[in-house]
């Protein structure tokens, strides 16, 4: 599929603020639950969230209750964007998680890999940046092997095919307590409409 793109000002300000607060509230819980995050402080802190079987186009009820209306809206808007702007055929949500990075964290070159039994080229990662402030000098952008750069601006949604090699540049910020927050989802699809025969 070879898709790597973004959408700025993705959520309304009200929904962005609510989802950002959800991420802030969940961080201490996630850090407490994740012993690996405490031991390996160089990688991102990531929540361990449920995977969904095939057939879901939005969050299942029990997950929606856990994250609230703003997460439901974000997932539904993501699906609409995948269909209407990026021309993805039959996107289904497979996972959701929250990830947090600060100046102590980094992420080297990698591919995300396949989801379920789908070929990797028909699987997507979607990240929505939930922090409220960002400065270009702070780094932290996603960089692809082909040289594309996507700065982690607040309320920016970044979408990519899971077979694209990428990394997260080091974060440089003078505030040791600053946290770059992401709500991420994985999706399966039948590909882009123009590459389905």
Image (tube, helix red, strand yellow):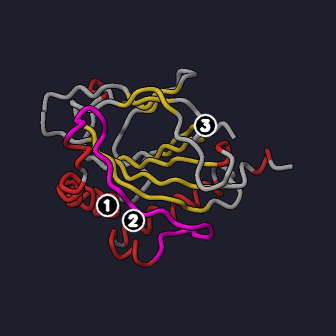
SS under mark 3: loop
Q: Residues within 10 Å of mark 1 (few under 14, many from 20)?
A: many
Residue picked out by circle 1 = 19
Magenta part of the chain: 39-60
Residue 178, relative to residue 71: is it above or below?
above
Residue drawn 19% across the image and 43% down it: 38
Mark 1 to mark 3 CA distance (whole Å): 28 Å
Most common secondary structure along the magenta stretch: loop
Let me know if residue 57 is in the magenta part: yes
Q: Earlier in the sequence, mark 2 or mark 3?
A: 2
Frontmost of labels 1 and 3 is 3
**In front here: 37 or 186?**
37
Marks 1/3 in contact by CB < 8 Å: the verdict is: no
Q: Earlier in the sequence, mark 1 or mark 3?
A: 1
**The N terminus sits in image quarter:** top right
Marks 2/1 in contact by CB < 8 Å: the verdict is: yes
Let me know if residue 65 is in the magenta part: no
Report the disc number at residue 81: none
List x then y, in percent, for residue 64: 40, 73
Residue 53, relative to residue 140: is it above or below?
below
Mark 2 to mark 1 CA distance (whole Å): 6 Å
Mark 2 to mark 3 CA distance (whole Å): 26 Å
List x then y, in percent, for residue 135: 27, 31
Q: Earlier in the sequence, mark 2 or mark 1?
A: 1
Marks 2/3 in contact by CB < 8 Å: the verdict is: no
Residue drawn 34% across the image and 72% down it: 68
Residue drawn 57% across the image and 37% down it: 4
Left or right placement of residue 15 versus residue 144 in this view: left
Residue picked out by circle 2 = 71
């Amino acid at each position: 599929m070879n898709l790597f793109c973004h959408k700025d000002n993705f959520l309304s300000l009200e929904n962005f603020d609510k989802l950002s607060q959800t991420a802030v509230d969940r961080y201490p819980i996630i850090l407490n639950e994740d012993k690996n995050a405490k031991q390996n402080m160089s990688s991102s802190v990531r929540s361990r969230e449920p995977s969904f079987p095939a057939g879901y186009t939005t969050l299942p009820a029990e997950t929606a209750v856990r994250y609230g209306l703003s997460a439901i809206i974000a997932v539904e808007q993501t699906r609409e964007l995948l269909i209407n702007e990026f021309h993805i055929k039959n996107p289904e949500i497979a996972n959701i998680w929250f990830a947090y990075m600060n100046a102590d964290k980094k992420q080297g070159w990698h591919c995300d890999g396949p989801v379920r039994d789908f070929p990797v080229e028909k699987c997507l990662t979607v990240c929505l940046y939930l922090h409220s402030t960002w400065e270009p000098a702070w780094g932290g952008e996603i960089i692809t092997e082909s040289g594309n750069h996507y700065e982690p601006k607040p309320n920016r949604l970044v979408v990519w095919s899971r077979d694209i090699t990428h990394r997260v540049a080091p974060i440089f910020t003078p505030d040791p307590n600053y946290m770059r927050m992401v709500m991420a989802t994985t999706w399966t699809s039948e590909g882009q409409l123009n590459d389905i025969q």
